[in-house]
Structure formats: C-alpha cells, structure tokens
Image (spheres, coloured by chain):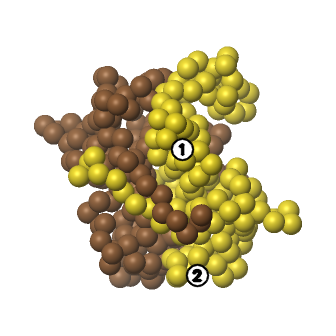
Chain colours: A yellow, B brown
Amino acid sequence: MAEDSCVIYPIGQVEKREGQTRLRVFSKYAPGLLGLGGFSHVHVFWWFGENDTPRKRETLQVHPRGDKENPLTGVFATRAPVRPNLIATTLCRIRGIDGEVIRIDAIEAFDGTPILDLKPYIPAADRPQGDVRVPQWVAGRCGRM
Amino acid sequence: MAEDSCVIYPIGQVEKREGQTRLRVFSKYAPGLLGLGGFSHVHVFWWFGENDTPRKRETLQVHPRGDKENPLTGVFATRAPVRPNLIATTLCRIRGIDGEVIRIDAIEAFDGTPILDLKPYIPAADRPQGDVRVPQWVAGRCGRM
C-alpha cells in the first residue's frame, strides 16, 4: 500500500480579485463549511501547481528561501515550494464567510490555485509541546523565526 | 486546472513496533531530511488510508469526535478522519533522527500508514496572528481547546 499513489481532488480555489483575497469552495463541498465561522483561523491546504513537473518533484535539497547563504537543506526541513508532493499549508485568519466564500487577508498562492483541504486551528493540536528549537538559518532572521 | 486531480506518492511510512514510534522515509527520499535535526518539531502529513472509500470521501458533515452531543459540523470545521481528501497532519516532537528514521513519541496513525510530506515547525508561519477563537464544542472540553 505505502508505495501506491493517493489521489486528491481540489475542493475549491484561491481567488485574488480587486484587492480581495478569498477562498471559494466548490458548491458540492459547501456543506463542509458548516460551523467554520466559529473559528478565528483556518489551515488552508493548497497545491503548488506551478511546480508540478517531474524535475521539481525530484528536488530534495535547496538553499532555503532561495538564499545561497543559507545551508543546503533537505526539502523536508524547509517549507520550500519544490518537494515530492506539492502540498502547501498556510494558516489564515478568517475575516468572514459568505456562503461558499471565505474572506482572508492574504495567502502566498496565485489566483486560481487549487485548494485541497481546510482544517480549523485548534490549539490543543497545533501548539507545540515543550521547547521549540529551529536552526540558525531560521532563527537568525529577526522576527522570522 | 482546479477541477483536475493531483497525485501524491507516499515518501515513507509510520512504524509502530516494540513500543517505539518511528517515521521511516523511503531511501530515495532520504536526502530530503538533511537539516531536519535542527528543528524540535515536525508537521507529519499522512493519509487516512483506512477511510479511502467513496462513501467516506463524500462525507461532508459529522458530529465532532464521534459525540452526538457535539453539533453537526462541516468536515472543514473539524479534524475528522473522513473528508474529501484524506490528508491528516500531526505536529510531532522530534526525539532523534537515525539515517532514514525519525523517532517520535506518538502519532494517532496505524503502523504502515503512508507519510505524504514532512514540514518543520517554524513559529513565524505556524503561530496564529491575533486572538484565537474556537466554538463551544472545542472550548468546552477542559484542556482540549
């Protein structure tokens, strides 16, 4: 099983129009939004579709943030948009929900980007237990740890 | 594009043996782990393979945590293991890395569960901005918010 592939069907898409950023869920999936308005934040799972090429999916090491001064690092130790499976996540503050549309402030995805899943921010699951440690290339950037 | 499907190839699997919990990355992906040891925590993306049936993928509303006293809620407002795309995430503390194997304390996935991706915990990306709000069914459980 573990070597088989899994198939993902986008459940919506990012919309960036007229200075607004929205997440539009396709109508068939809209019942899945019931109750999301009770949360302040949502994890948005999206697909780095721009990078869905065999070469980019075979990339296993990068200089983080495209900066050659950062040490060569495995993609599983970065949030780089090249990786074997092009899943991205962004934690977004929910500004409002209008039917099938979630208004957010910003997301670093293009207009039309496929959305794969939405999960609410739940502190008990999402806050790390114990001390947090990051390497120098992360910690060294003021305010970007 | 947005209505097309995306294909995911597992990059490893969960191992639960002899009281130990480990994440084993397949050899071809092992270079992707370089530098992960500098982080204390990793987001593990895995596949709810047990639920990969058409009926479970069509489930859009549930009573969270299987408790009928919790209000009927859209799956995108829960962490339920039934949803259109069966992506799960667990934030794990890294206990150590030995070659292709990451030792962790626990994960609510079965032995042999496919791992889809690993991303380091980076506070600037993973800490919510502003106040956090959750609905009553989450907040009402002492210590489980």
Taking the spot 63% from the left edge, 20% from the top edge, the residue there is A70
Q: Residue at x 58, y 81 (%)?
A: A27
Could you tell me residue A12's position as x and y percent? 59, 69
Q: Are marks 1 and 2 on the same chain?
A: yes
- Circle 2 is placed at which residue position? A27
Look at mark 1 in the image and give the residue it sits on: A53
Q: Nearer the viewer, residue A32 or B126?
A: A32
Relative image position of residue B93 (x, y in whole percent): 40, 37
**What element does badge 1 sit on?**
loop
Residue B116 percent location from the top left of the image: 39, 47
Residue drawn at x 42%, y 25% is B31
Left or right for A123, reference A142: left
Amino acid on which the number 2 mark rests in the picture: Ser
Relative placement, left or right, of A139 versus A132 is right
Q: Secondary structure at mark 2?
A: helix
Quarter of the image with the N terminus of chain B in it: bottom right
- Going by the image, does B67 lie left or right of B138? left
Residue B43 visible in the displayed image: no
- Apparent side of residue A123 relative to residue B94 in the rendered image (left or right): right
Badge 1 vs badge 2, beta-carbon distance below 8 Å: no
Question: Would residue A19 be seen by someone viewing this image from the given angle?
Answer: yes
| Chain designation of label 1 | A
Residue A4 versus residue B11 in the image, above or below: below
Q: Chain of mark 2?
A: A
Seen as rendered, the residue at the extreme front is A54
Rendered view: B30 above or below B22: above
Q: Quadrant of residue B11?
A: top left
As drawn, the label of residue A63 is none
Label whose residue precedes the other's in the sequence (1 or 2):
2
Vertical position of residue A56 compared to residue A96: above or below: above
Compute the Cα span from label 1 to label 2: 29 Å
